[in-house]
Image (cartoon, rainbow, N blue to C red):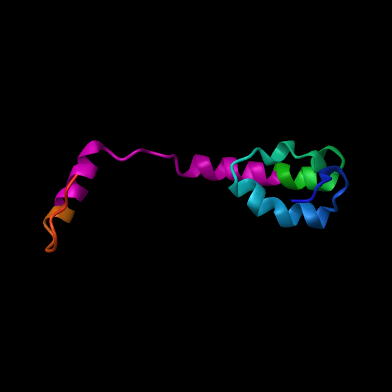
Amino acid sequence: MIDCPETMSCQQFQSQLPELIGSGSVASTHPHLQHCELCKRLMDDLESIAEAARQLLPIVDPSERLWDQIESAIRSEPGPPITR
């Protein structure tokens, strides 16, 4: 990462976005956004898109029964025995 995020160019900031977002950090608090309206609007758009995507396919944890079925199917496969 560049040492002075307040003075980085939009190109530098945007090239770091995948890493920044992928790291799990809150990209919308990046110091570059305090000084750049263009990148701030880009982040707002990306956050809106991500929120819309989360609403399309809500995260549902699979049931314990599903894990039991998967384990049973694996155990029925030929090969060395599976131990816990």
Residue at horizontal 59%, vertical 42%?
24
Q: Residue 28, image x and y in percent?
A: 71, 38
User: Against 77, is 35 above or below?
Assistant: above
Nearer the observer, 48 or 24? 24
Secondary structure predominantly adopted by residues drawn in magenta: helix
Task: Tell whether 50 sits left or right of 84.
Answer: right
Question: In front here: 84 or 12?
Answer: 84
Q: Pinpoint residue 59: horizontal percent, then vertical percent.
A: 42, 40
For the point 51% across and 39% down, which residue is it? 55
Does the magenta run of residues contain 53? Answer: yes
Would residue 44 be found to the left or right of residue 69 on screen?
Answer: right
Give the quadrant of residue 40: top right
Which quarter of the figure is the C terminus placed in? Answer: top left
Judge left or right: residue 18 versus residue 6: left
Rendered residue at 59%/49% (across/down): 22
Q: Residue 30 sits in which quadrant?
A: top right
The residue sitting at the bottom extreme is 78
Q: Nearer the viewer, residue 8 or 58?
A: 8
Residue 56, magenta (yes or no): yes
Bounds of the magenta segment: 45-72
**Coordinates of residue 14 in the picture (x, y in percent):** 75, 54
Query: Which residue: 24% across, 37% down?
Result: 64
The number of numbered badges drawn on the structure is 0
Please provide percent x and percent y for residue 65: 20, 39
